[in-house]
Image (cartoon, helix red, strand yellow):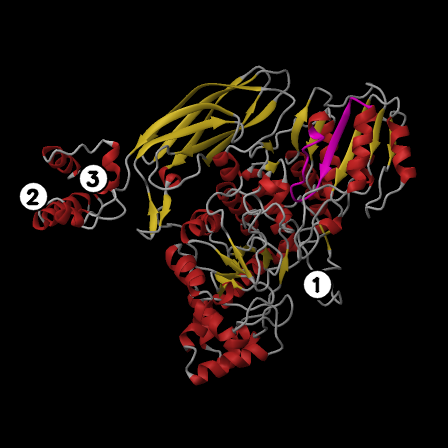
Amino acid sequence: MTPSTASAPVPSRRAADAVARLDTAQKAALTTGASFWHTADLPAAGLPSVMVTDGPHGLRKQVEGGDHLGLLDGVAATCFPPAVTLASTWDAALVQRVGDAIGAEALAEQVAVVLGPGVNIKRSVRCGRNFEYFSEDPFLAGRLGAAWVRGVQARGVGASLKHFAANNQETDRLRISAEVDERTLHEIYLRAFRHVVTTEQPWTVMCAYNALNGVFAAENRWLLTEVLREEWGFQGLVVSDWGAVHDRAAALAAGLDLEMPGTGGRTAAEVVAAVAAGSLAEGDLDLAAQRVADVVLRAGDTARATAAARPDLDALHETHHELAREAAAAGVVLLTNDGVLPLTAGQGRVAVVGELARTPRYQGAGSSQITPTRLDDALTALTGRLGADAVRFAPGYRLDGDADDALDDDALAAAEGADVVVVFCGLPPQDESEGYDREHIELPDVQTALLERLLAVHDRVVVVLSHGSVVRVSGWAGRAAAVVEGWLGGQGGGEGTARVLLGEVNPSGRLAETVPVRLEDTPDYLDFPGEQRTVRYGEGVFVGYRWYDGRDLPVAFPFGHGLSYTTFGYADATARLVGDVVRVEVDVTNEGDRDGRETVQVYAGLPGSSVRRPVRELCGFAQVDVPAGATVRARVDVPLDELRYWSVGARGWRLEGGTYRFAVGASSRDRRAALDVSVAGDGPVFPLTVDSTVGEWLADPVVGTMARERAVAFGLDPDSPAFEMAKQMPMRGVVGFAPGLVDLAELEEAAAAARAATA
């Protein structure tokens, strides 16, 4: 992972000139919000107030006079599928189009920065905010997050990459300290952020509420300055999450430029006092103010450039509703199917069961909650296609979870004599939200009880799921004729799901997270959510499928899984080193009679690695559209940088030499080919010295042969089991244990030669 070559304007000369006209109090005001959603208004310096809004899956602009916290009463905007659904598309181009649409609506509503996307890793299936994050895998999260930012910022609207960093739970999120080791931080929890920053340069990065290894993110200089700016080259603005700042002067010194929301002048006064006292350098305040000014000026440039051609919001909403439907359908994952799907008109009566078919759960609760411009439901969409005479609906259960025997009986009556029963199940809004975590991963009891009764009397039951975080499906999924994962579909989810059920769209979604058999199998089960204001990331780098595959644990459905209404064969896979990438190619044949899309996934592992590694990690993927009966050759280029691990000893990324195993397939468990490629590494992490072990000397490419020959001449067998203990001894100690074998001066001379050869 080489240093970034991405660039964006550093605080411009215009920004510096504008800030030069401000006194200390005005600069302090500029770096603290004026209100809940607006920056300070300093017209004399050419710095008008600009507005930011929430919006990872749509624009959540608060109406004037709305609730104080701004969580309700948003203006109507297109509610796209949340990140959990977009991630299941594995389609960066589609995610970019969604970002572009959100940017267009922001532009029309005169919003300067949209607060998104969230690229935090789904460490725990119990995190209440998982619906707002992309994946358990940082490679996938980074690619999709970058596409979202690219789409929004193409409109001249800023994005705000969040929540930086290790914000992976809602429990005690305002003060919890995430205790994460250095390697795990870089390889898992910072990796998606790094990719988005270095490829797209978002206008802003939002710091998290939580502390990281004992230091609040808002005041963490290592995180905000040393990593984000100095290591990654970030040139934009760092903004706080709302209310995340504990010490404003300390936050400024650490690299946090803009505090939100406004504090009525209280923290601006603290900054002025700190500068006067000499405890905060005025240069730090100047730089933060310049970064805020730069965003304000860039927003002004966009506003002037588009003033004469402001978009027609009604027309945008109409176009974007169809895009929302497209995205919802693309995110549907067909988990199982015995042939009952797709449904067809004229095949007989269809019983549609479940209140969620009529009253859709289409987004998560909390700060990302959108007021949709319109709302599709699956019942209306199915009835419109199949005909009112062919569809019989029964709500089956109440969304509040209260038992209702009459509803239960009506559902069984609707199923009687039906050719197919389509049951809509899922989590009601109160079961998952920003602000609290889940205690379990079960569907509501009233739904599972109904489902069991239907499965007992009908052999063609299709289950359609709607939720934002993983639910347990073990126990019944294998008895259903088909299981369809619809996630949260946004305002077009009802229509999008219907298109898949009816075969108008061939499902192509793939899981962006593992579905475990049970909660007790999950990597964080014993550590989540922590205690006494601390949570330990005890699983290290083994998050998600890395954990399940490494332990060979059974799972309900693996990472990357997803079926289609056709089947795909893989053949003639190859892998070879081309410059600084490993080029993987494979023929994909559509073996059915429907056109379809396949997502070819490539995972890398290094058997015999000198460090603990997952057995396989996603390192690339490609989507190919394959007509029925045709063959398409897919290509995935894996940069060697994606094979690096974070070396604590070297304090940086290292490429370990060896023979890498590349698995090509349709999920982390459905691997169709295994290909070996030899890769030269960076050399030893620790330069050879007299304090290196005997084993390290034997393995050294320069002096290893000499060390082996000397041991054999002395009557020792380096390959014998008895020699294993000796391999752990520092070579310095051999001088005393085996006089005559080697002397210290000779060792130091040989070690110097080895260091020189590998420098």
Against 679, is 126 above or below? Answer: below
Q: Which mark is residue 38?
A: none
Mark 3 vs 1: CB contact within 8 A? no
* In magenta segment, residue 534: no
Circle count: 3
Q: Which mark is residue 740?
A: 2
In the displayed structure image, the side of residue 595 where residue 194 appears, left or right = left
Against 202, is 23 above or below? Answer: below
Q: Which residue is label 1 attached to?
A: 70
Which amino acid does the dot numbered 3 rest on?
A: Asp
Looking at the rendering, the stretch of residues picked out in magenta corresponds to 458-477
In the displayed structure image, the side of residue 732 where residue 481 appears, left or right = right
Q: Pick whichever of labels 3 and 1 is earlier in the sequence.
A: 1
- What is the C-alpha distance between the residues marked 2 and 3? 22 Å
Residue 108 visible in rendering: yes
Secondary element under disc 3, as helix, strand or loop, is loop
Q: Residue furthest right?
A: 406
